[in-house]
Amino acid sequence: MYFKYQTRILLTQLKLPRCYATGQKPPPKERRPVGLAHPPDPKTVSCDYIGPPDPHSNLRPYVRHYDDNETALAKKLRLMRIEVEAWNASFWSRHNKRFYEEKEDFIRLHKEAGNDDISADRMSVFYKTFLDKNRRIHLMYNLSWYMKNFDMLTLAFMVHVQNLLARAKRRTGD
């Protein structure tokens, strides 16, 4: 058993990309940015698209596919998902803006006090203070997030049951 893993260990010690050690192809040297210049039209695509991260919220936006013949329940689920995604992106955009503004203020104040080099320990004090100060906001966000997700899961379950019943009805009708 020792000899089985010895080759992999030796290859990983060469500090090559992990795929060499597992026998996979190496990654391409030049990576082009992935994504579209404009989001696709939800009526013309055959599946959901996930876009590049938003610069403000750091969340990847969705373009939800839908059919013209979607049921009222499926439409309700799709619209709820879009609403929750917009709420989530809005929260994280505001949160990140507040975080970066306070971080810049923290750094500026330390530089004005004569501390040009801010250590990781001092930054950890800022991070802890920021999290403590926003604890209640994060708690309320988490509660809201869980409740919204539970509602979506319940609705998704109902859509799934509806689809199963429709499929069973088609099978018995054919």
Image: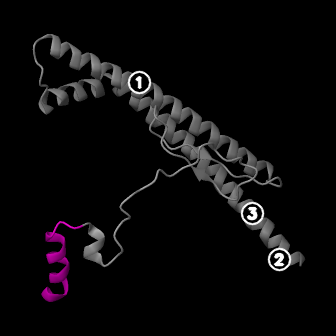
| Residue at horizontal 48 percent and vertical 42 percent from the top | 53
- Count of numbered circles in the view: 3
**For the residue labelled by badge 3, is the local secondary structure a helix, a strand or a loop?**
helix
What amino acid is found at the position of numbered circle 3 in the picture? Asn
Give percent across and percent down for residue 19. Answer: 30, 71
Quarter holding the N terminus is bottom left
**What number is the disc on residue 171?**
2
| Residue at horizontal 28 percent and vertical 23 percent from the top | 103
Identify the residue under disc 3: 163
Q: As drawn, is 108 to the left or to the right of 85?
A: left
Give the magenta-colored segment's residue range.
Answer: 1-16
Q: Is residue 13 magenta?
A: yes
Label 3 CA crowd tier, 10 Å (few <14, some 14–19, many 20+)? some
**Precedes in sequence: disc 2 or disc 1:** 1
Q: As drawn, is 169 to the left or to the right of 121?
A: right
What amino acid is found at the position of numbered circle 1 in the picture? Lys
What amino acid is found at the position of numbered circle 2 in the picture? Arg
| Residue in the foreground of this view, choosing between 82 and 155 | 82
* 41 up-or-down from 88: above or below: below
**Precedes in sequence: disc 3 or disc 2:** 3
Q: Are marks 3 and 2 in contact (CB under 8 Å)?
A: no
Quarter holding the C terminus is bottom right
Quadrant position of residue 96: top left
Give percent across and percent down for residue 86. Answer: 58, 35
Identify the residue under disc 1: 97
